Amino acid sequence: MPTFLIEKNIMVPLRDGVQLATDVYRLHDAPPAPVLIARTPYNKEGILGGSDTFDIMRAVQAGYVVVVQDVRGRYDSEGAFSPHFQETADGVDAFAWAAAQPWSSGVVGAFGGSYLGGTQWLPARENPAALRAMAPSIAASDSYDGCSYQGGAKVLHDLRWVVANIVPAEMARRAARGEPLLESDTPLDVDGAFTELPLATHPFIREYASFYLDWLAHPTPDDYWLPASQRAGYTQITAPALNISGWYDIFPWSTLQNYTGMKQSGGSEVARCHQRVIIGPWTHMNFTGSFPEREFGAAASAAAIDLAGIQLRWFDRWLKGVENGIDQEPPVMILVMGVDEWRTEADWPLPDTRYRPYYLHSGGGANSLRGDGALSTESPGDEAPDVYLYNPLRPVPTVGGQVILPGGNAMGPRDQRAVELRDDVLVYSTPPLEQAVEVIGPIELRLFVSSSARDTDFTGKLVDVYPDGRAMILTEGILRARYHNSLTEPELLEADTVYELRLDLWATANVFLSGHRIRLEVSSSNFPRFDRNSNTGGVIASEPRGEYRTAVNRILHDRAHPSHLLLPVIER
C-alpha cells in the first residue's frame, strides 16, 4: 500500500519576500509527478478530504502531488490581504515554486472553486511556463462585471463574504499577533450590514476590510479593475480549462463567458480548441441537485456524474499526456431542468438556437399576481403602460435564485408567489402551454420605460409556473438606468422620458413542460441580492437613508414600444 506523506506549513517565498504557508500531499518515495495546486483564502486546513467536486487523496492516489496554499494575508501566510489584485503575481510565483520542487515533474494544473477559480485565471494571464491545465469551478470572469457589480448595480454577496469570512479571520490574525482589536457598540452581522445605509459604514469593515471601500468607490468598469479582470487576459492564456458552475450559482454567466471568451480569443490553439463547460442544477454551495422546494433527481448531483473523476481525467490528458478521449468529447455538458436530464452539446450557445420574442401585454394593470399581465408571441397593439411605485426603503425581497444568503433555504429554486403578490411587482404570464417549450441559452429583456426619477433600477426575472401554481425562479437580472447607454459613461434620465433598456438575465436551460406557463416578473429592486437605488441620481454608496426617494416607474408595451422577453428556443 502506498504511504501518504503530508508536509505542513512550508513557507514559500514570493518575489517580494513575503512567505505563504503551503501544504504538500504526495506519495512517499514516488517518482516526480505532476502538481495540482489550489490557492485559497478560506484556510488550507479545511480543504482536505473527499467531496463531490474534488478529492485530494484520490488525486494523490492517481499519481499527483497536491499543493494547497493560504493566499497572502490569510491564515498562516504572511502579508496583507488585497482580494483579487494580489493573485496574479503571487500565483505565478507559486506555480513556479511547485514546478521546481524535486517531487514535481515540472508541470502544474490548478483546481478549486469560487475565489480559488480566480487564483487560477489571474496568474494564467501571465502565461506561466509550468501551467498546462485548469479546472476552475463557480468562478468569476471579471472582478467588476458579474462579481462586484451587475448591470451597474452593486451585488451584495461580496458584502456577505466580507462580513462572514474576511472580518472574523482578520480579527483572529491580529489577536494572535497580540494586536489590540477595535471595539464597537454595534455587532457586525450579515443582516445588519445589508440594511445599513450608507453601505459598509460599520467600523469593523473599515478597519479589517478597507478594500471594500475601494470597490464601492469604483461603480463603473474603469481602469481600477483591469489588474483583477480574468477576461482581460484571455489572449495571453494558453492553458485549456474545464469550467464548472450551476444554474443557481452566482457565476453561471461568468463561467459561460470564460468558456466562450477563451474559445474565441485564447492565447494558443490548444486553449481555443479545448475549453469545456459543465453546468448542473447547483448553487454556489450545493452540488447535490436537492433543494427544499425542488428535487432534480439523484442523477443531478456532482457525485452522480463523478465530477471529481472528470477533473482527474482532464488533468490526466493535459498533464500526463494520457489519450483518454476527454478532449474528443462534446465540450458542453448541461443539466436541462424541467426534464431534469443531462445533455451534451457541440457548443454554447447551442448551434440550433432560435431567439423568439415574447411580448408584454396588459390593460395597464399587471401589478401583482392578481393583475392582468400577459406574455405572448403576438406583438402588442394600443395598450396602456403599467405603473408602479418603487420605494427603496420597501424593496422587493430576494427569494432564492443566483445568490449566497444566510439560511438553509435561501438559495436556488424557490417559489416566487409571495413576491408576486406585491403591487410593485409586474407579472406577465403565458397561458398554459399546449406543448413544451425548450429554452436553453442567454436571456435578454428589452423594456421601454420611463421614470419620475433621474435614476432608478429595473429588474427582470424568468419563472417556470407549474400547473399547481408554484412559480419557480430560473434566472434574473438588473439594470441601473443611469447606465442605459454605457456602463462606463453614466447618463441620468430625463423625468418621464421614454428609454429603451436591455437587461441581461444571464442564462438558463429549462424545458417549460406542457401545462406550465412562462412568466416574467418586472420590478425595480431585488434586495439583498442587489443594493437599492436611492432614485436621486447621486452617489448611492455614500447616500444616507434620509436621502432616499420614491420613484414612479412605467413599463410601456404598445406598437411603438414593444417591450419583450427574448428567449433562446430550441426546436428539435
Image (cartoon, helix red, strand yellow):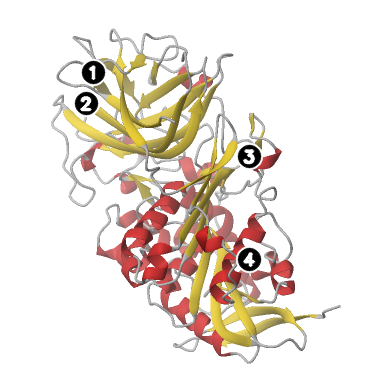
The kind of residue on which mark 1 rests is His
Residue 479: quarter of image = top left
The kind of residue on which mark 2 rests is Phe
In the displayed structure, 359 sits above or below 319; it is above
Front residue of this view, candidates 100 and 393: 100
Q: Which mark sits nearer the N-terminus, 4 or 2?
A: 4
- Secondary structure of the residue carrying tag 2 is strand
Residue 181 seen from this side: no
Observer-side mark, 1 or 3, equals 1
Using a 10 Å C-alpha cutoff, classify the residue at mark 1 as few (fewer than 14 neighbours), some (14 to 19) or many (20 or more). many
Distance from disc 2 to disc 1, alpha carbons, whole Å, reads 7 Å
Q: Which mark sits nearer the N-terminus, 3 or 2?
A: 3
Observer-side mark, 4 or 2, equals 4
- Secondary structure of the residue carrying tag 1 is loop
Distance from disc 1 to disc 3, alpha carbons, whole Å, reads 38 Å
Observer-side mark, 3 or 2, equals 2
Q: Residue at x 42, y 51 (%)?
A: 256
Distance from disc 4 to disc 1, alpha carbons, whole Å, reads 51 Å
Q: Residue at x 46, y 38 (%)?
A: 528
Q: Name the residue under label 4.
A: 312
The kind of residue on which mark 3 rests is Gly
In the displayed structure, 238 sits above or below 209; it is below
Q: Which mark sits nearer the N-terminus, 3 or 4?
A: 4
Do the CB atoms of the residues marked 2 and 1 lie less than 8 Å apart?
yes
Front residue of this view, candidates 97 and 450: 97
Q: Mark 3 points at which residue?
A: 407
Distance from disc 3 to disc 4, alpha carbons, whole Å, reads 33 Å
Do the CB atoms of the residues marked 3 and 2 lie less than 8 Å apart?
no
Using a 10 Å C-alpha cutoff, classify the residue at mark 2 as few (fewer than 14 neighbours), some (14 to 19) or many (20 or more). many
The kind of residue on which mark 4 rests is Leu
Q: Name the residue under label 2.
A: 448
Q: Mark 1 points at which residue?
A: 557
